[in-house]
Amino acid sequence: MKIIQISDSHISIDRPARTAELEACIRQINAADTQPDAVVHTGDVAHDGLVEEYQVARDLLDTLAVPYYVLAGNRDNRQVLSEVFADGHCIKPGMEFIQYPVEQFETRLICIDTVSGASNKGRLCTARLAHLESMLAADQSRPTALFLHHPPFEVNVAPDPFQFEEWAEVDALQTLIRQHGQVCGIYCGHVHRQFESKIGSVEASVATCIASDLRWDQVSSCVYTRSLPH
């Protein structure tokens, strides 16, 4: 299975270049000789959480030739994102947390909500961890990829390597991952630079941002191909 990950488009009415960059990114994906099975946007879809920003993002993402899935980042407004991107299946208006499984592929995808609301760092409260545990326990027969905005591991190339408010919550997540051997990959955004790591034996990575004016590394592409086991 082939997944394309994109992240941190930070669509802003005041920054039209970011809209153009997301549009170019989508053209690149649609022009690929081998199409992915799906695209996952790992958060910070919009910069100010405005309905106009999400509508721009949705109009562009709807031009993808394959299914796509979005999750919330620290700059996102959950309520507005869930209303604009509601599909009646994965995302529904008024979701407390934008956290859900994608079941239609041979590899399961689980989108995890790490938004704090109190800061730009990540949170994984008891309710979200319990929901994640129930999603992992629901099907242990298929490989499962996890998508989060905030990296639940140390990113030592960033000025602040720790991207969560409560690292006890990260420890709880890492324990869950070790308990569920079907987890095959962890894919994140947020720090606006590429980074590779591991949680136990599971490959973990960070994608840089689409918004080039916010990027902290030099990359030739902000489109990341993830080959997942079948």
Image (spheres, helix red, strand yellow):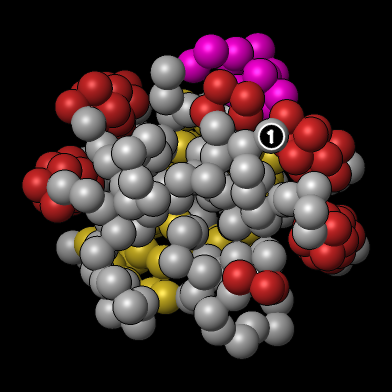
Instruction: Write down the quadrant of residue 76 in the picture.
Output: top right
Span shown in magenta: 82-95
> Does the magenta stretch mainly form a helix, a strand or a loop?
loop
Say which element carries label 1. loop
Q: Residues within 10 Å of mark 1 (few under 14, many from 20)?
A: some
Task: Let me know if residue 54 is in the magenta part.
Answer: no
The residue furthest front is: 14
Which residue is located at x 53 percent, y 46 percent?
75
Q: Position of residue 63 (x, y in %)?
A: 88, 42
Q: Position of residue 179 (x, y in %)?
A: 14, 42
Task: Decide: is 197 above or below 92.
Answer: below
Q: Position of residue 79 (x, y in %)?
A: 56, 22
The residue furthest bottom is: 218
Instruction: Write down the quadrant of residue 180 in the picture.
Output: top left
Horizontal side of 104 relative to 169 (left or right) equals right
Kind of residue sitting beneath label 1: Leu
Horizontal side of 71 relative to 220 (left or right) equals left
Q: How many marks?
A: 1
Q: Is residue 117 visible?
A: yes
Which residue is located at x 35 percent, y 58 percent?
151
Instruction: Write down the quadrant of residue 50 in the picture.
Output: top right
Which residue is located at x 60 percent, y 57 percent?
8
Task: Let me know if residue 84 is in the magenta part.
Answer: yes
Q: Is residue 2 visible?
A: no
Which residue is located at x 36 percent, y 77 percent?
158
Judging by the rendered image, the residue that carries numbered circle 1 is 50
Task: Decide: is 194 above or below 223.
Answer: below
Camera-side residue of 165 and 99? 165
Horizontal side of 105 relative to 155 (left or right) equals right
